Image (cartoon, helix red, strand yellow):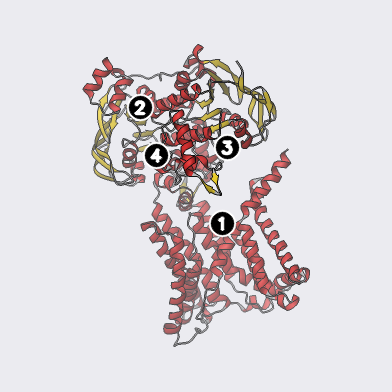
C-alpha cells in the first residue's frame, strides 16, 4: 500500500468508524439508523436548497480549516481561529455598514478589513511566541475571549446605540447574490465560496511554490536547520500566524457579508473556529484535504437539521457522530497501525 | 571451544532488497567479537534479527548449540542476550536504579522496594567495576555514565551475551579507555560480547575475532591477532584504503579568518570560550584538537552566527562578522559542515534535493521573484548527488531515509559547492565508515589545495593529525598551543588537551 493511498484511506476509515459507532448508539437509544442516515443525506444533498445551504456552511469551514492548517505547517497550533474569526466578522460588517462606496471598492474593502483584523489578532500571539517563547496555545485561547467580549462591546456601544444587532451591511458590500439564491431555491448561498477556493489555492501556492513557503516549511520541520541556513525563524513564526489569522478573518467575512449580513452580540463562541481545528486535522493540514473535509463537516452540520424533522432523531446525536469522527481521526495512529498490519500481510 | 551464539547463513529481505545475504557469525564464550561493516552494510539488521526484532527468511540461530526461534525481544532477553543501544533508552528524570528496574520492578505488597533494588544495582555495579551511583538522576550524569547504566540494565536482566552498538561514538577518549576496561572485566566474569563498530583501532585493541560484512554479504571472520587495520579496512570496503591521507605541502597565504579575544557563553550562561585567538590562512587546514566540552561547540556556533558572542572580533578577509546573522556570514563566504547533521545540517522531512539548496533557494536560478524553480533545484541536486557520490534512490527521497554517511556527503556537497573562502568542518566524519571518511578528507584537502581556508574541529586525534597543517589545541575555551602535526605526538597532544603546558608536555612525550 503506498503512503499516499494510506493517508487518503485513514480519514475515510475514521469517518466510517464514526458512522458505525453512531449507528450503534442510535440502535441502542431506539432510533432507526437507516431512516436517520437517510434523513441526514436528504438534509444535505437531497435537494438543491440543501446543497446550497451545505456550500454556504462549508465556506467558512474551509477558511477556518486553512487558518489552523497553515499555522500547523509552520509548527504552530492556532487555537485562536475563533477569536480571529470574530474580529474578522466584526471588521467586515463595520466597514459594510459605515461607508457608502461603489461596490467595486466597498466589497473588497470590507473583505480586506476582515482579513487585516484577523491577521492583527493573530499577530499578537505570533509576536509573543517569537520574542518571548510564550506558548501560542495559551495566548490564542485567551485572545478568543478578548475577541468575543470586545466585539460585543463594539457592536453594542459603538456601531449601534445599545442594540444587540447591527444594521444589514450595505448592498454594495454584500456577498449575497439574488442569482445564486434563486438557482438554489432561495438558500443563503453567497459568493464567498469563490474566496474560499482562492484561499485554498493561495495556501498551496504559497507553501509549495514560493521561497517564502520554503522558509515556512523549513521552520515548521526543523527550526534549528532553518536558522543554520540563514532563515529568520522569528519572522517566519510571526508571518505564519499573521497569514493564518488572515484566513480566519476571511472566514468571519463569509458570515458577516454573506450568510447573515450583520453582526450580533453573542453569548458565546460560534464554534466555527474550533470546528476548523477538526477540519484541518481530518484534512491532514493540506489545502486540498481541508477543502474536502470542510465539505464533509458542512454536510453533517446542515444535514443534521433534517434529522429531527424527518427521523425524529435529536440533532445532539449528530453532534455526537461528528465528535466520534474527530475522535477517530485524532486517533488515526491506531488506524495507521492497522493498515500497516494489513499491508504487511499482503507482502507475505 | 563451544559457541554461545551461532547465526548460520542468515538471510533477511525487505521488499526485495536483500539486507543480509548468507551471513554467518559465531560467538565463542568469553570472547569479544567485532562486527565490522560500512554504514548500511547490514550490521544493525543482523543484530535486530538476533534480538528478535526481525525474522530471517533463511538461516538458523543457535544458542549454546540449541536451535532457537527468537520471535521477539523478550525471548532474546530470556536467552540471556542484552543490547546496549547507541541511542540510550533511558528516562532522564528517573534515577539510575529506577531506570534499571523499569519493567522488572521488585515489589513488596504492591509497592516498589527501591532499597532492595538499589542494593542489587550497587552489587552488580561493583562486581563489574562500573562505579555507578544507583541514586543519581540520569539527567545529572555524563554520557559515559549513562552508557554504563545501559550496560547495568542488561546485566540486571541476566544477560550473558552483550551486544554493543557503536558504543564509542558518543564517548570522549578517556571514557573510551574506561569502557574498554569494563569490557575486559565483563569477559573475565564470563560474559561474551558482540561489538558493532567501524573503528578499526578499537577492534585491534579489544576484540579477539572479527566478522566482516560488506553490502549485506558475509565476507568472513578473521582472528584479530593475525590481521592488521589495513587488511580489515580493505575487507570491509572491498578495495585498498589509504589511511595516511595523501597530501602535498600546504602553501599558506594571507589570513582569511582572524579571531581575536572571542568570548562566548554557553546555554547555562557560563563562559565557554574565554578570549580565544586564532587565525586561519588561505591554503591551509587548521585542526582544533581538544576534549569534548572545552568550548568547541560554542566557538563554532559563535563564528557561524548560531550563537551570540559576548565580545571579541571575528574577521573574514578583513571584514568584521561578529554577531552577524547566519545568512550574512554564509554569504560572506563561509561554508559550515555542522557538528549535528540532524539538528542543523538537514531538514530531514524535506527531499534530499530541497536540502541541497537550503541556503541558496532564494538565489537564481533556483528561484525568481520569490517563485521556486523546482526544475533547476533538482537539476542541481542531481549533479551534486552524482559528484559527491550520495547514494540515494533519487533526488526526491526524503533526507531522513538516507544513511548517516550519505547525509553527510550531501551536506559536504552543498557546502563545498558554494566554494566558500572558509570551510568550517565540525566533526565531519563522526559515525562514518572508513570509505566515507577517506572521501571527506580528500574533499577537505582539495578545498585547501584550491587556496581556501579550512577549519576542522574533531575529537578524533587521528583525524586531526592526518588532515591538519597546523593543530590548535583548545582547553577551557582558549587556544593553549599551536603545534605542527609533523613535530608532535599523540601523547604530547593528549597532555596539552588535558591542560598541561607546552614545556611539560614536550618533556613527557620525550620520555
Does residue B443 appear to the left or right of B266 in the view shown?
right
Q: Which residue is mark 1?
A: A285
Badge 1 vs badge 2, beta-carbon distance below 8 Å: no
Alpha carbon separation for disc pair 4 and 1:
41 Å
Alpha carbon separation for disc pair 2 and 4:
40 Å
Q: Which residue is mark 2?
A: B448
How packed is label 4: few (under 14 Cα within 10 Å), some, or many (20 or more)? some
* Quadrant location of the N terminus of chain B in the rendered image: top right
How packed is label 2: few (under 14 Cα within 10 Å), some, or many (20 or more)? many
**Which residue of the protein is positioned furthest toward the top in this rendering?**
B226
Badge 3 vs badge 1, beta-carbon distance below 8 Å: no
Q: Image height check: is B304 above or below B66?
A: below
Which comes before the other along the chain, label 3 or label 4? 4
Measured from the top left, where is residue A25 in percent x and y?
Answer: 71, 67
Res B309 → quadrant: top left
Measured from the top left, where is residue B198 in percent x and y?
Answer: 49, 25
Which comes before the other along the chain, label 2 or label 3? 3
Q: Could you say whether the residue bearing mark 3 is in a helix, strand or loop?
A: loop
Measured from the top left, where is residue B498 in percent x and y?
Answer: 29, 28
1 and 2 marks on the same chain:
no
Q: Could you say whether the residue bearing mark 4 is in a helix, strand or loop?
A: loop
How packed is label 1: few (under 14 Cα within 10 Å), some, or many (20 or more)? many
Task: Out of B9 and B77, give the one closest to the viewer.
Answer: B77
Alpha carbon separation for disc pair 3 and 1:
26 Å
Task: Out of B339 and A17, give the one closest to the viewer.
Answer: A17
Q: Which residue is mark 4?
A: B141
3 and 1 marks on the same chain:
no
Does residue A45 appear to the left or right of A60 in the view shown?
right
3 and 4 marks on the same chain:
yes
Q: Could you say whether the residue bearing mark 1 is in a helix, strand or loop?
A: loop
Amino acid at each position: 500500500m503506498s503512503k499516499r493511498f494510506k493517508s487518503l484511506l485513514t480519514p475515510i476509515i475514521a469517518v466510517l468508524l464514526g458512522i458505525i459507532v453512531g449507528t450503534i448508539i442510535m440502535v441502542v437509544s431506539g432510533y432507526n439508523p437507516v431512516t436517520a442516515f437517510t434523513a441526514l443525506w436528504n438534509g444535505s444533498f437531497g435537494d438543491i436548497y440543501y446543497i446550497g445551504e451545505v456550500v454556504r456552511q462549508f465556506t467558512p469551514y474551509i477558511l477556518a480549516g486553512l487558518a489552523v492548517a497553515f499555522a500547523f505547517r509552520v509548527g504552530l497550533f492556532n487555537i485562536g481561529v475563533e477569536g480571529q474569526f470574530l474580529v474578522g466578522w466584526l471588521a467586515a460588517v463595520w466597514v459594510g455598514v459605515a461607508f457608502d462606496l461603489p461596490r467595486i471598492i466597498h466589497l473588497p474593502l470590507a473583505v480586506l478589513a476582515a482579513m487585516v483584523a484577523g491577521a492583527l489578532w493573530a499577530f499578537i500571539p505570533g509576536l509573543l511566541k517569537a520574542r518571548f517563547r510564550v506558548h501560542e496555545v495559551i495566548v490564542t485561547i485567551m485572545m478568543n475571549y478578548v475577541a468575543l467580549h470586545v466585539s460585543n462591546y463594539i457592536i453594542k456601544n459603538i456601531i449601534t446605540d445599545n442594540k444587540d444587532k447591527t444594521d444589514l451591511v450595505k448592498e454594495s458590500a454584500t456577498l449575497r447574490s439574488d442569482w445564486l439564491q434563486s438557482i438554489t431555491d432561495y438558500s443563503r448561498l453567497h459568493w464567498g465560496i469563490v474566496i474560499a477556493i482562492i484561499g485554498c489555492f493561495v495556501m498551496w501556492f504559497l507553501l509549495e511554490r514560493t521561497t517564502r513557503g520554503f522558509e515556512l516549511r523549513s521552520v515548521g520541520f526543523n527550526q534549528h536547520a532553518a536558522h543554520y541556513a540563514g532563515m529568520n525563524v522569528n519572522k517566519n513564526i510571526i508571518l505564519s500566524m499573521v497569514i493564518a489569522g488572515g484566513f480566519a478573518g476571511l472566514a468571519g467575512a463569509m458570515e458577516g457579508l454573506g450568510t447573515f449580513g450583520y453582526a450580533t452580540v453573542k453569548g458565546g463562541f460560534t464554534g466555527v473556529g474550533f470546528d476548523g481545528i477538526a477540519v484541518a486535522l481530518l484534512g491532514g493540514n493540506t489545502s486540498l484535504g481541508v477543502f474536502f473535509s470542510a465539505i464533509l463537516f458542512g454536510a453533517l452540520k446542515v444535514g443534521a437539521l433534517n434529522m429531527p424533522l424527518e427521523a425524529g432523531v435529536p440533532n445532539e446525536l449528530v453532534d455526537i457522530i461528528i465528535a466520534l469522527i474527530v475522535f477517530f481521526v485524532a486517533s488515526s495512529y491506531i488506524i495507521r497501525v492497522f493498515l500497516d498490519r494489513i499491508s504487511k500481510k499482503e507482502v507475505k | 571451544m563451544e559457541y554461545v551464539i551461532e547465526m548460520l547463513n542468515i538471510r533477511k529481505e525487505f521488499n526485495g532488497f536483500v539486507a543480509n545475504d548468507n551471513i554467518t557469525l559465531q560467538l565463542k564464550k568469553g570472547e569479544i567479537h567485532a562486527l565490522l561493516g560500512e554504514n548500511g552494510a547490514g550490521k544493525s539488521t543482523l543484530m535486530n534479527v538476533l534480538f528478535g526484532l526481525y525474522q530471517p527468511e533463511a538461516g538458523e540461530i543457535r544458542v549454546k548449540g540449541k536451535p532457537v526461534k527468537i520471535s521477539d525481544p523478550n525471548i532474546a532477553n530470556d536467552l540471556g542476550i542484552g543490547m546496549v543501544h547507541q541511542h540510550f533508552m533511558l528516562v532522564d528524570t528517573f534515577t539510575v536504579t529506577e531506570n534499571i528496574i523499569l519493567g522488572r520492578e521488585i515489589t513488596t505488597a504492591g509497592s516498589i522496594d527501591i532499597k532492595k533494588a538499589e542494593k542489587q544495582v550497587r552489587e552488580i555495579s561493583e562486581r563489574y567495576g562500573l562505579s555507578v551511583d544507583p541514586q543519581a538522576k540520569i539527567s545529572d550524569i555524563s554520557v559515559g555514565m549513562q552508557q554504563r547504566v545501559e550496560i547495568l540494565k542488561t546485566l540486571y536482566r541476566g544477560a550473558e551475551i552483550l551486544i554493543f552498538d557503536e558504543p564509542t561514538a558518543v564517548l570522549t577518549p578517556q571514557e573510551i579507555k574506561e569502557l574498554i576496561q569494563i569490557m575486559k572485566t565483563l569477559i573475565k566474569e564470563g560474559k561474551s560480547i558482540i561489538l558493532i563498530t567501524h573503528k578499526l583501532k578499537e577492534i585491534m585493541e579489544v576484540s579477539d575475532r572479527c566478522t566482516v560484512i560488506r553490502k549485506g554479504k558475509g565476507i568472513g571472520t578473521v582472528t584479530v591477532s593475525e590481521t592488521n587495520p589495513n587488511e580489515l579496512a580493505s575487507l570491509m570496503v572491498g578495495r585498498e584504503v589509504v589511511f595516511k591521507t595523501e597530501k602535498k605541502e600546504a602553501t599558506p597565504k594571507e589570513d582569511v579568518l582572524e579571531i581575536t579575544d572571542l568570548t562566548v557563553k554557553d546555554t547555562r550562561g557560563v563562559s565557554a570560550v574565554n578570549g580565544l585567538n586564532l587565525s586561519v590562512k588561505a591554503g591551509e587546514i587548521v585542526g582544533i584538537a581538544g576534549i569534548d566540552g572545552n568550548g568547541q561547540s560554542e566557538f563554532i556556533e559563535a563564528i557561524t552566527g548560531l550563537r551570540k558572542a559576548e565580545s571579541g572580533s571575528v574577521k573574514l578577509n578583513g571584514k568584521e562578522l561578529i554577531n552577524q546573522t547566519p545568512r550574512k556570514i554564509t554569504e560572506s563566504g563561509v561554508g559550515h559542515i555542522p557538528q549535528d547533521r540532524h539538528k542543523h545540517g538537514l531538514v530531514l522531512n524535506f527531499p534530499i534535493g530541497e536540502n541541497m539548496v537550503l541556503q541558496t533557494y532564494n538565489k537564481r536560478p533556483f528561484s525568481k521573484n520569490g517563485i521556486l524553480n523546482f526544475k533547476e533545484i533538482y537539476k542541481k541536486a542531481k549533479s551534486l548527488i552524482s559528484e559527491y557520490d550520495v547514494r540515494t534512490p533519487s533526488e526526491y527521497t526524503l533526507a531522513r531515509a538516507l544513511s548517516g554517511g550519505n547525509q553527510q556527503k550531501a551536506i559536504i556537497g552543498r557546502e563545498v559547492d558554494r566554494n566558500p573562502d572558509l570551510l568550517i568542518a565540525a566533526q565531519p566524519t563522526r559515525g562514518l565508515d572508513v570509505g566515507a571518511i577517506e572521501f571527506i578528507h580528500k574533499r577537505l584537502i582539495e578545498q585547501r589545495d584550491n587556496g581556501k581556508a579550512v577549519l576542522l574541529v574533531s575529537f578524533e586525534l587521528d583525524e586531526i593529525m592526518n588532515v591538519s597543517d597546523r593543530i590548535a589545541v583548545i582547553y577551557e575555551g582558549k587556544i593553549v598551543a599551536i603545534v605542527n602535526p609533523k613535530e608532535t605526538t599523540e601523547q604530547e597532544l593528549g597532555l596539552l588537551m588535558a591542560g598541561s603546558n607546552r614545556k611539560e608536555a614536550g618533556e613527557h612525550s620525550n620520555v
